Image (cartoon, rainbow, N blue to C red):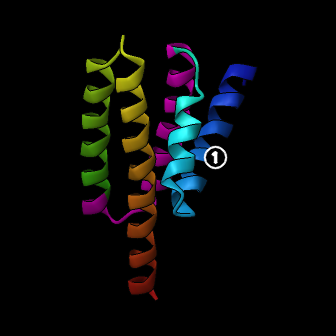
Amino acid sequence: MTDEHGAGRRTADDLVRLLTDGDPAGAEELLAGIPTIRDLVFVGAGLTSIARTEARRLPPAQRAQANTRQLRLGFLRDANREDPEGLRGWLQRSAEEVLLIRSQLAVADRFAG
């Protein structure tokens, strides 16, 4: 993993942590501090990796829904490819997707016993 990949993944983890802790202002501040489109995309790669890895543990129907949401997030990314503010919105939604997957996993785990 290159330094850029590692930095993107760490920032992705930080973003998810801030949202998990109920700190949307901190998440916005973190996103505002990402200076370049390249850096934004590396953070997005980190979020995508987290979401896809965790979604693999979902029940089949929820996993299919998560895959569809990932495709839609890809469309959002592509539509904003030259717009840093648009990419920050994509990152926000991608981090929220991770939180949704985690909440679905928690429910599935409760029902699995």
The quadrant in which residue 84 appears is top left
Relative horizontal placement of residue 35, taking residue 57 as reference (left or right): right
Relative horizontal placement of residue 73, taking residue 113 as reference (left or right): left
Spot occupied by residue 26 in the image (x, y as percentages of width and height): 57, 48
Is 57 magenta? The answer is yes
| Residue at 27% over, 44% down | 69
Instruction: Describe the element under mark 1 as helix, strand or loop.
Output: helix
Q: Is residue 12 above or below residue 43?
A: below
Label 1 neighbourhood size at 10 Å, few (<14), some (14-19), many (20+)? some
As drawn, which residue projects farthest toward the top? 82
Please provide the residue range marked out in magenta: 37-62
Q: Which residue is mark 1?
A: 14
Q: Is residue 108 above or below residue 27?
A: below
| Residue at 44% over, 85% down | 110
* Front-most of residues 28 and 55: 28
Q: Say if residue 31 shows up in the picture.
A: yes
Q: Is residue 42 above or below residue 104?
A: above
* Front-most of residues 110 and 6: 6
Spot occupied by residue 66 in the image (x, y as percentages of width and height): 31, 51
Q: Is residue 35 above or below residue 13?
A: above
Amino acid on which disc 1 is placed: Asp
The quadrant in which residue 11 appears is top right
Is 26 magenta? The answer is no
| Residue at 42% over, 41% down | 92
